[in-house]
Image (spheres, rainbow, N blue to C red):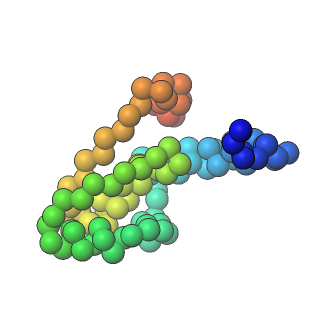
Amino acid sequence: QQNIALPKQLDSYHHLLSFGRTMLDKLAAWQGDFNVDNLTIHGQHHFEEMAQKKQGVLILGSHLGNIELCRALGRRHSHVKINALVFTQHAEQFNAVMKAV
């Protein structure tokens, strides 16, 4: 047996709320409406250092993050080329909704 806590009363609500917020953030990022100054980027100094040295960097993101916010990062560092690879096979319905909007 694993010591995994049972879901609490509002866990599903909080999960869906977080998903909805992420969806709105994605839309804002695609529209260019995300203010880069409002971002908290953990380990940003590492990115800044590599950008100054003109060295490549690999940024890994999960579904808990928002890879689309790399667009905002790219606006701050317009001289840096950013290539984002996103695995979308398991997100067909989500992607269809995002394309429709």
Q: How many marks?
A: 0
Residue furthest front in the image: 1
Q: Residue at x 44, y 68 (%)?
A: 42
Judge whether residue 25 can be spotted in this image. yes
Residue furthest right in the image: 9
Asked whether 77 or 4 is in front, the reply is 4
Left or right of 10 in this view: 68: left
Asked whether 71 or 46 is in front, the reply is 46
| Residue 67: percent from left, percent from top | 41, 49
Left or right of 40 in this view: 51: left
| Residue 81: percent from left, percent from top | 20, 55
Asked whether 31 or 56 is in front, the reply is 56
Judge whether residue 96 can be spotted in this image. no
| Residue 17: percent from left, percent from top | 69, 47
Picture quadrant where residue 78 is located: bottom left
Q: Residue at x 47, y 66 (%)?
A: 39
Residue furthest left in the image: 54
Q: Residue at x 71, y 38 (%)?
A: 1
Q: Residue at x 30, y 71 (%)?
A: 46
Picture quadrant where residue 15 is located: top right
Residue 90 position (above or below residue 50): above
